[in-house]
Structures are given as structure tokens and as C-alpha cells.
Image (cartoon, helix red, strand yellow):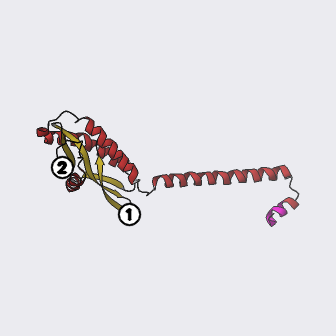
Amino acid sequence: MSRRWRAYLKRGSDTTAADRGQLVLVSGAVVAVALLALVFAHAQLAYGGSADAPELSDISAATQDAAHAATAHVAGRYSWGARQAAVSEFRDELDPNLARIERAHTGSGGVAITTNDSAASGWALRNCPSGVYRDFGSCVADRGVVVQERAGETTVVAVAVDVVVSTPRHETDVTLAVTAV
């Protein structure tokens, strides 16, 4: 107890133990409210200020889903001679989905996804489905999309994309070949 408080009590005040208890209770409540305000402020800053990069596996899975969805609009609709139109429609369906993936990862950095024609050409040379029981045509890369002639129709096989993930602390560049069938 401080000297001032003791002097006050010695002067004959009519302060009781109950009064002192109430003072302690009020002081505790003030401290609790102050701590609660600090906890809320910290939680808001931690939520808004996160600089963690999105997981590449999440971006890859979302891109794979976008490629499968875009393929559904093209499957069985274009002959091999109309493959450029098939690729155009595929891209028309894919590009808005890639933009949604980019917007989903905005914050203190971001994600940028673009198709990569040279990576698609390399993938087509190395990974074009073929074999004894596959009587398919060769693969062709067009604007980052790999297509193959199957039974006279254009089949979208894969799409190659460059993914750039950036945060204030670092930047990651990766090229993905996403199969579409």
C-alpha cells in the first residue's frame, strides 16, 4: 500500500475493505478493457498485413481445374482443320478463369499467370500422347495451348503457363504444363 493511501486511512476516513475491493475491481476492469483493445488491434494488423505467398500447389490445382473446365467447351466441336478456332475458344474460356485465380491472391503481393507458347512447344515434342494403341496425330502448340488430332477432331491436351508469385519479401517464377484431358 502506498504512503498516501495509508495516510488517508489514518486520518479517520470511513473507507472500508468493501470500498477498497471495489477500487481493485474497477482497476482490473480498466486493465482488461485495455488488453482487449490491444488484442483486437493486433488481430486486425496480423490479418491485413500478412505477406505469406500463396501455395504453388493451390495455384497449380486451380489452373488445372480451369483448364478442365475450358476443355469441356471445346471437346468434340472442332475438326482438325479448325484447330485455331478451337484454341481461340479454349483461350476465351480459360483466360477469365486465370484472371479469377490472380484476383483471388491479391494482398501484399500477387499472382500473375500467362500462357507460354515456347514451353507448350517443348511439352508437345516431349510428352505428346502416342503409342501402339494410340492412333493419334502429332501435337501442335498454338498460343500456349497444346492440341492433338484425334479421330479427325481437335483435342486440347495441355496448356503451358508461367506463374509469377510475388510478395514484398520475394518473387517466385515457375512454368507449369497443365494437362487438360
Horizontal relation, residue 1 to residue 123: left or right: right
Evaluate whether residue 16 shows in this view. Answer: no
Q: Quadrant where the N terminus lies?
A: bottom right
Horizontal relation, residue 96 to residue 1: left or right: left
Counting residues from the start of the chain, the first of labels 2 and 1 encountered is 2
Alpha-carbon distance for marks 2 and 1?
29 Å
Local secondary structure at mark 1: loop
Q: Quadrant of residue 116?
A: bottom left
x and y, in percent, of residue 105 in the image: 37, 50
Amino acid type at circle 1 is His
Which residue is at a point 17% across and 47% down the rendered structure image? Answer: 138
x and y, in percent, of residue 168 in the image: 39, 62
Which secondary structure class fits the magenta region best?
Answer: helix
Residue 16 vs 97, above or below: the answer is: below
Evaluate whether residue 40 shows in this view. Answer: yes
Task: Tell me, for residue 123, which label it has, or none.
Answer: none
Closest to the observer, 101 or 87: 87
Q: Quadrant of residue 154?
A: top left
Closest to the observer, 106 or 89: 89
Local secondary structure at mark 2: loop
Residue, disc 1: 170
Q: Residues within 10 Å of mark 1 (few under 14, many from 20)?
A: few
The magenta stretch is 2-8
Closest to the observer, 120 or 40: 120
x and y, in percent, of residue 74 in the image: 22, 36
Instruction: Tell me the mark number nearer the camera, choosing from 2 and 1.
Output: 2
Q: Is residue 11 magenta?
A: no
Task: Tell me, for residue 143, which label it has, or none.
Answer: 2
Which residue is at a point 81% across and 66% down the rendered structure image? Answer: 3
Q: Quadrant of residue 11?
A: bottom right
